[in-house]
Amino acid sequence: MNTSTPVLPQVNGVVLSYPNEGLTTEALRQRACAELLRQEAIQAGLLSVDDPLPLGGAMTEAASTAIEALLDRELKLPEPSEDALRRHHAAQRGRYAVGERAQLRHVLFAVTPGVDVNALRQRAEACLLDVRCAKPGGEDRFAVAASSTSNCPTGADGGALGWLTADDCAPEFAREIFGKPEVGVLPRLVHSRFGLHVVEVLARQPGTEPSFEAVKSAVAQALRQQAFATALRQYLQLLAGAATLIGVDLEAAASPLVQ
């Protein structure tokens, strides 16, 4: 009989979670990154050493403010140039279209506390392969997969989401769908805060594309966000390299480490 105590995930000796919380891998990474920043804010003199440890992942208001000040000081982000703005706009014109709609259906593999994410991904990839291999005119295997597998109530209707705009969707989901020409079952899983999606685009209605000047501020904001995400990832990698991490892998993060 194995009575050994399980190793708890930690950052420099601070425990991130306990077994009864059932955190997903990504949620654990988020906590680790937040704790790295909280500890660095203390080292930088921006936060009291007596700041209470996060409870259930929730840190104090003082810690949140100190981390914002730390990032403002450490992440030096230049303003995007006019040329960079125009290049981005030329490459992503569809992203700024107004009124674009897509008729969609999906199969959702929800990421819930305690779920085995690797096993979930394997199931989602197997589903994607199955529906992409379906013969035209045969059984609607997408609808069958949605009704039998999807964790979304739309499964009862074959996964139908109807006509949607980007504003109707979570931003990370919308980025994978809109501003693109693809129709049919997408050849990749779509990741969102809800889980993994197998998505079929049934039809598209293009929107109108405003001029560069009309969307210049939105383009600039998009480039600032990209630069911030890159700089934050690099900064966290530096902090992680100097820290003692137990039971958490930050190198494997597939999305921005702190949101």
Image (cartoon, rainbow, N blue to C red):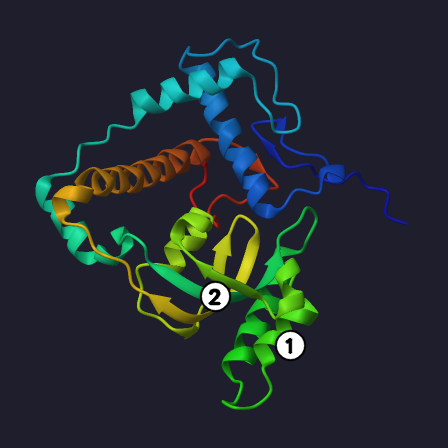
Q: Is residue 178 left or right of residue 20?
A: left
For the residues labelled 1 and 2, the Cα–Cα distance comes to 16 Å
113 vs 137: above or below: above
Pointer 1 residue: 144
Pointer 2 residue: 104
Q: Residues within 10 Å of mark 1 (few under 14, many from 20)?
A: some
Q: Looking at the image, can residue 191 be seen? A: yes
Q: Is residue 92 left or right of residue 120?
A: left
What's the residue type where badge 2 is placed?
A: Leu
Label 1: element kind: helix
Q: Earlier in the sequence, mark 1 or mark 2?
A: 2
Q: Looking at the image, can residue 118 be seen? A: no
How far across and down, in percent of the image, does residue 193 sit?
53, 48
How many numbered markers are drawn? Answer: 2
Q: Quadrant of residue 67?
A: top left
Q: Are marks 1 and 2 in contact (CB under 8 Å)?
A: no
How far across and down, in percent of the image, does residue 139 sit?
60, 87
Label 2: element kind: strand
Q: Nearer the viewer, mark 1 or mark 2?
A: 2
What's the residue type where badge 1 is placed?
A: Val
104 vs 66: above or below: below
Question: Where's the C terminus, which quadrant?
Answer: top left
Q: Residues within 10 Å of mark 2 (few under 14, many from 20)?
A: many
- Residue at position x 60%, y 75% from top? 143
Q: Nearer the viewer, residue 215 or 19?
A: 215
Q: Nearer the viewer, residue 5 or 63?
A: 63
Q: Is residue 25 left or right of residue 41?
A: right
- Residue at position x 56%, y 90% from top? 138
- Residue at position x 21%, y 55% from top? 209
How far across and down, in percent of the image, does residue 122 sit?
60, 67
